[in-house]
Image (cartoon, rainbow, N blue to C red):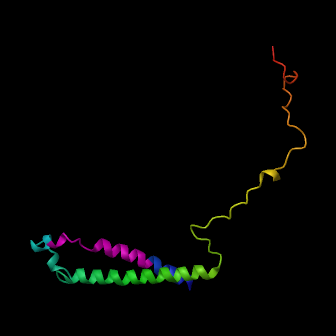
Amino acid sequence: MEIVILVVHVLAALAIIGLVLLQHGKGADVGAAFGSGASGSLFGASGSANFLSRATAILAVVFFATSLGLTLFSARKGDNKGVMATQPAQKPTAPDQVPVPSAPLSKPAPADGSKAGEVPK
């Protein structure tokens, strides 16, 4: 069922993109008044605008409903970590709990065989 809703969601998104690209802007009405050919369309001068805007509104409702449906499916799974989920913070150790090394740290002996602290000649 989740896959069906996901497919409908993606198809609605693509259809909304297509319908928005097909619609004319508000400035296109001025061009239609001077005979740009929009009045001879399949739905008439304003019929296509009404049809496309209604279809876009219906697809927007479908997109919103499928978004809510996918959210409900995700919430029911129980392993939803979300985008803002973070790992729990590590509890800092107190200064008195810091481990102290048992032996003092010393510098390693030089590779050329000289003693530590001796300046090479």
Horizontal arrangement in the rendering, residue 39 relative to residue 8 (left or right): left
Question: Which of the image's four quarters has the C terminus?
Answer: top right
Task: Tell me if 75 is positioned left or right of 33 in this view.
Answer: right
Closest to the observer, 93 or 70: 93
Q: Position of residue 80 (x, y in %)?
A: 62, 74
Quick one: 87 or 14, which is closer to the camera? 87
Relative to 86, does residue 11 appear above or below in the rendering? below
The kind of secondary structure the magenta stretch mainly shows is helix
Q: Quadrant of residue 42?
A: bottom left
Percent coordinates x, y for residue 36 in the rendering: 13, 71
Rendering coords of residue 29 (x, y %) = 16, 73
Residue 96 drawn above or below residue 87: above
Residue closest to the far right: 102
Task: Indicate the quadrant where residue 104 lies.
Answer: top right
Instruction: Give the quadrant of residue 44.
Output: bottom left
Toward the viewer: 48 or 83?
83
Name the residue rendered at 32%, 73% in the picture.
Answer: 20
Q: Residue at coordinates 78% horizontally, 51% vertically from top-left?
A: 95
Residue 24 among magenta residues: yes
* Residue located farthest toward the front when viewing the structure as drawn: 96
Taking 105 as reference, is 21 left or right?
A: left
Q: Is residue 91 left or right of residue 47?
A: right
Location of residue 105 in the rendering, given as x and y in whole percent from the top left corner: 85, 37
Residue drawn at x 27%, y 74% is 23
Stretch in magenta: 11-29
* Image quadrant in which the N terminus is located: bottom right
**Farthest left residue?**
34
